[in-house]
């Protein structure tokens, strides 16, 4: 329960920051061009608001429905579908009375702010924390794969050399690289031999469904216990942090995954004997496995690998942050394209608020929070610029048409377009969150 609360709190804080600044982008350009803004809301407020106050011409408030936010600009057909105002002659302070180029900038304001925000966050994160990643060449014990990894042609202990004969610097970018760049082959070293593995035709669809199929292989010893899971039979049996696990049921192991395989092969709720070393003394602890056949201990595996650490000065962090922003946008566009490729079944992975909330860690971590907020800011910018009526991109499309042709779409057409766009967005929202519910039911 505590984990869910922390995830939810991070999601709401992140969305609040992004929505307020997105709407601020529209607000600033509207005020710059002397266009009246009637309302500025975080979250939607059908029927009532949680909080509101009037300052000047604008009502500021917080709604109760956390699906976004909005600014209501005078003389504009938006999600409020306020048509009464449009029956009156245009006023100089209204959106519809402004030149097309000003209206275009007002509509692009939110997207521009979101993208710039992402870059600013990336610059700050790189300056404060730097970067840390596991180089592929440092995965010196090879990989551990499950049935999906075997389906791809890999085996435990394979050392990945390249993908389509191109070296991937960050080990954890290998699977995204295969998915996003439609890779066909993996080059590995296996038992001293170099092999060129042809990926199966369904590789991308399989990896989208289950990305956890390739992990670095970790030696078993030294197995120093650094923590416990919430439900930990080992902790109940008296195992302590700092103990070294040396054997299970008298068996020693070469690699960590061999211990996992041994436990999974045991009957449910079987008692196993953990042999631990504590202050030079050898102790046997009987422990019952959980229903999932775990003993509930955590170990620090980072000391087995040499991670690359990159520190940035302030001036260095600026181009690095800009580059990361554009790189993230490029990768997301590639991911988005996969949704329209039926063979990949990427549409089945489309998720709603539960999926978004689950990308946040179960403990509060500012490094992860800001990185994920920057990523969501890029998603928000990209999704809003799509040429769908009711989104900023829909308004931009009609404004570009007006700029090119010199003809402004009629108010009636804009009303119908706005209504159609809202129906599309509601359908997408129901589909994405429906996927979340289906995934929960299947668990």
Image: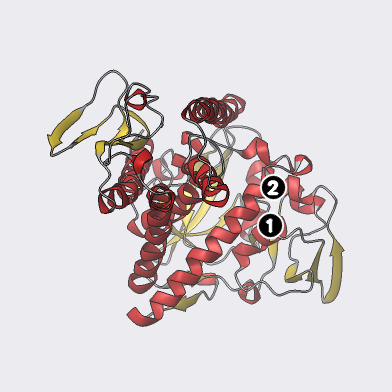
Task: From the viewer's side, name the closer residue of 142 and 436.
Answer: 436
Q: For residue 443, say whether it is visible.
A: no
From the viewer's perspective, tell me whether residue 36 is left or right of residue 138: left
Against 101, is 56 above or below? above
Q: Residues at badges 1 and 2 in contact (C-beta under 8 Å)?
A: yes
From the viewer's perspective, tell me whether residue 106 is left or right of residue 192: left
Residue, disc 1: 180
Task: From the viewer's side, name the closer residue of 172 and 339.
Answer: 339
Residue 395 in percent (x, y) is at 48, 41
Instruction: Bin the neighbour count of mark 2 within 10 Å (Cα to Cα): few under 14, some 14-19, many 20 and up.
Output: many
Residue 82 in percent (x, y) is at 36, 24
Q: Quadrant of the C terminus?
A: top right
Q: CA distance from mark 1 to mark 2?
A: 8 Å
Task: From the viewer's side, name the closer residue of 129 and 422.
Answer: 422
Q: Considering the numbered disc 2 on the image, is that residue within a helix, a strand or a loop? A: helix
Q: For residue 310, say whether it is visible.
A: yes
From the viewer's perspective, tell me whether residue 192 is left or right of residue 231: right
Q: Quadrant of the N terminus?
A: top left
Q: Residue furthest top?
A: 47
Residue 303 in percent (x, y) is at 49, 71
Chain-order first, disc 1 or disc 2: 1
Residue, disc 2: 338
Q: Considering the numbered disc 1 on the image, is that residue within a helix, a strand or a loop? A: helix
The answer to which quarter of the image holds residue 370 is bottom left
From the viewer's perspective, tell me whether residue 56 is left or right of residue 146: left
The answer to which quarter of the image holds residue 6 is top left
Q: Which mark is residue 78?
A: none
Q: Residue at x 47, y 46 (%)?
A: 359
Residue 104 in percent (x, y) is at 43, 50
The answer to which quarter of the image holds residue 278 is bottom left
Against 200, is 347 above or below? above
Instruction: Bin the neighbour count of mark 1 within 10 Å (Cα to Cα): few under 14, some 14-19, many 20 and up.
Output: some
């Amino acid at each position: 329960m505590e984990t869910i609360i922390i995830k939810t709190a991070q999601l709401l804080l992140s969305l609040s920051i992004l929505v307020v600044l997105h709407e601020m982008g529209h607000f600033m350009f509207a005020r710059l061009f002397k266009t009246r803004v009637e309302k500025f809301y975080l979250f939607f407020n059908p029927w009532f608001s949680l909080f509101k106050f009037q300052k000047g011409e604008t009502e500021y408030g917080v709604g109760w429905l956390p699906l976004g936010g909005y600014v209501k600009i005078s003389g504009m057909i938006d999600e409020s579908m306020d048509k009464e105002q449009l029956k009156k002659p245009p006023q100089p302070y209204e959106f519809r009375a402004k030149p097309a180029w000003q209206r275009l900038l007002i509509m692009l304001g939110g997207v521009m702010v979101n993208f710039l925000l992402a870059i600013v966050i990336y610059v700050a994160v790189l300056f404060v924390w730097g970067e840390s990643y596991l180089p592929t060449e440092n995965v010196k014990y090879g990989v551990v794969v499950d049935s999906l990894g075997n389906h791809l042609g890999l085996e435990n202990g394979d050392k990945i050399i390249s993908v389509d004969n191109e070296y991937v610097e960050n080990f954890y970018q290998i699977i995204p690289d295969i998915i996003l760049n439609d890779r066909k082959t993996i080059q590995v070293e296996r038992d001293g031999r170099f092999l060129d593995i042809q990926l199966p035709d369904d590789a991308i669809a399989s990896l989208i469904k289950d990305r956890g199929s390739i992990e670095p292989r970790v030696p078993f010893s030294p197995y120093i216990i650094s923590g416990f899971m919430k439900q930990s039979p080992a902790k109940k049996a008296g195992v302590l942090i700092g103990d070294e696990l040396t054997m299970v049921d008298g068996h020693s192991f070469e690699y960590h995954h061999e211990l996992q395989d041994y436990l999974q092969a045991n009957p449910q709720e079987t008692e196993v004997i953990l042999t631990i070393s504590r202050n030079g003394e050898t102790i046997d602890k009987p422990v019952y496995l959980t229903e999932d056949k775990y003993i509930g201990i955590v170990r620090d595996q980072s000391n087995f690998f040499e991670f690359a650490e990159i520190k940035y000065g302030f001036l260095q962090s600026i181009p690095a942050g800009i580059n990361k922003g554009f790189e993230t946008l490029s990768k997301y566009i590639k991911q988005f394209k996969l949704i329209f490729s039926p063979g990949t079944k990427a549409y089945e992975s489309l998720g709603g608020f539960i999926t978004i909330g689950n990308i946040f860690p179960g403990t509060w971590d500012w490094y992860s929070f800001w990185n994920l907020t920057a990523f969501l800011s890029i998603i928000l910018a990209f999704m809003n610029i799509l040429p769908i009526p009711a989104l900023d991109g829909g308004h931009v499309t009609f404004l570009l048409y007006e700029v090119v042709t010199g003809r402004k779409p009629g108010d009636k057409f804009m009303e119908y377009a706005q209504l159609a766009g809202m129906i599309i967005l509601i359908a997408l929202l129901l589909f994405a969150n429906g996927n979340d519910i289906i995934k929960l039911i299947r668990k």
